Image (spheres, helix red, strand yellow):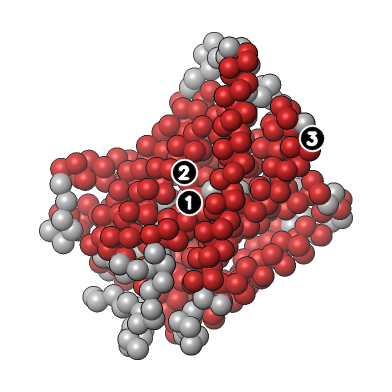
Amino acid sequence: MTFKVATAPRRLGFWMACALVVGNMIGSGVFLLPASLSPFGWNAVVAWVVTISGALCLAAVFAKLAAAMPAAGGPYAYSRAAFGPAPAFLVAWSYWVALLVGNGAIATAAMSYLSLFFPLLTQVQGLHAAVTLTLIWVLTLTNCRGAIMAGRVQLVTTILKIIPLVLVIGVAIVVLASTGGGAVMPIEPGEFNLGGITAAATLTLWALLGLESATIPADKVDQPETTIPRATMVGTAFTGALYLLVCSAIVLLSPRGSLEGSNAPFADFIAMHLGANAGAFISIFAIISALGALNGWILLQGELPSAMARDGVFPDYLAKTSSRGVPVRAHIISSAVLSGVVLLNYSKSMAEFFNFLILLSTTSCLVMYLMTALAALTLQARRRLPGTALFSILAVMALIYSVWTIWGAGAEAMLWGLVLLAMGVPVYFLSRRRPVAEG
C-alpha cells in the first residue's frame, strides 16, 4: 500500500509543528484539571510523573514511525501498514471520536472561564451551549482558510498561553521561599495508593493528549521525516515538564479540598496569592489557551477523515479539497457532529460534562495509542521499521502504559469506547472502496 502525499505546498515548519503539539496539549487541562486532581493530593504528583514517562515513550514511538512513514493520517497510516485496512479504520475511527468529544470538553473548559466575566453563561440554561457552538464554527471557518492560517493562530496562542504558566511557577517559588516549605500540603499517613495514582493518571493523561498532533497533517509539513519527530519529542518533553511544575504547585500549595468544584482553579490559586485582579488576568489567558487548543484540534478533526476518505475507507465526499488543498467538507461534517455532542449534553453542569468527556475522549484516544505501539513492534519484527533494542523497550513500555491507563479509565468509559468502536463497523463496510487517485 502506498500512502498518498498531497501535492499542495508544505508550509508548516518546525516551530509551527511544535506549536501544534504544545498548543494542542496545553489547552483546557492545565487550567481546569487541578480541581479534578485536588482530592488525590500527593497521588496526583506521582500520577504526573508516571503519565509524563508514558507520554515520552509514546512520543518516541510516534517519532520513529513518522520518520519512516511521513504519511497523512499519522496513526491510521501506521496501523494500515502493520495490520491492514479494517483494523486501521477502527483505530482512526476511535481517534476521530476522541477528537470530537475532546473538542467538546475543551470548548466546555473555555466556557467555564468565560463564565467568570459573564455569569449569565451559568445562569441561563443553554446559553453556554450557544456560545460554545459559535466558537466552534468561528474556528472551523479559520481552518477552512488553510493550514497556514491555522498554524499562525496556533503559534500566537501557544506563546500567549505559556505566560500565565510561568507566572504560576514564579508565585510558587516565592511562596516556598517565604514559608520555607510550610505551605506545602502535608503527606497524610497511608496517602499513597495504587488506586489513587491510577485514577489520577487517567485524568492527567487527558492533559497530554495531542503528542501525536504533528503526525496527522504530515502532507502539510515541511520535511516531515525530520520535522515531525523533532516537534513531537521536543513538544512532549517541554509540555510534560511545564505541567508537572504548574499543576503540582497549584494542588500542593492550596488548602486540601479548597479547589474541589471550582470552575477556575488556576485563577483561584493566583487570586489567593496576588489578589482578585490577578485571578481575572489569568482567566483571560486561560480562555486564549483553550481556544488555541480548540483551533489545533479542529485542524486534526478535519484532516484525519479526509486522509481516510482518500484511502477508500471513508465516504468519498470527505476526500474532496478546496483550491487551497483544505478538506473543507471534512471540516464541516466533523464540526457538525461536534455540535451535536455539545447539544446532547448541554443540560449537564460544566463540571459534570467536562469530566465525562475527558474520560470518554481519553479512552478512545488510548485505543489509538495502544494500536500505534503494537504497529511499531509489528513493523520492527517484519524488518519494515528500523529500530534498536532501546526502541523496542520504549515501545513495550508504551504498550504497557496504554493498557494500564485503559484499565484505569473505568468500566463506564471502556463500555462507551466499545460501543463507539462497534458503531464504526457498519461505517467501514458501507464506505469501503478503491482509494481516490492521486492528483
Residue 239 numbered tag:
2
**Residue 428: quadrant of the picture:** bottom left
Q: Left of 323 or right of it: where is 56?
A: left
The answer for how far apart the CA atoms under marks 2 and 3 are is 27 Å
2 and 1 marks in contact (CB < 8 Å): yes
Residue for point 69% across, 33% down: 270
Q: Position of residue 434 (x, y in %)?
A: 33, 85
- Name above or below for residue 264 compared with residue 91: above
Label 3, on which residue? 276
Which amino acid type is marked by label 3?
Ala
**Residue 170: quadrant of the picture:** top right
Q: Give the mark nearer the N terminus: 2 vs 1.
A: 1
Label 1, on which residue? 22
Q: Nearer the viewer, residue 5 or 350?
A: 5
Q: Residues within 10 Å of mark 1 (few under 14, many from 20)?
A: many
Q: Could you tell me if residue 166 is visible in this image?
A: yes
Q: Give the mark nearer the N terminus: 2 vs 3.
A: 2
Residue 148 numbered tag:
none
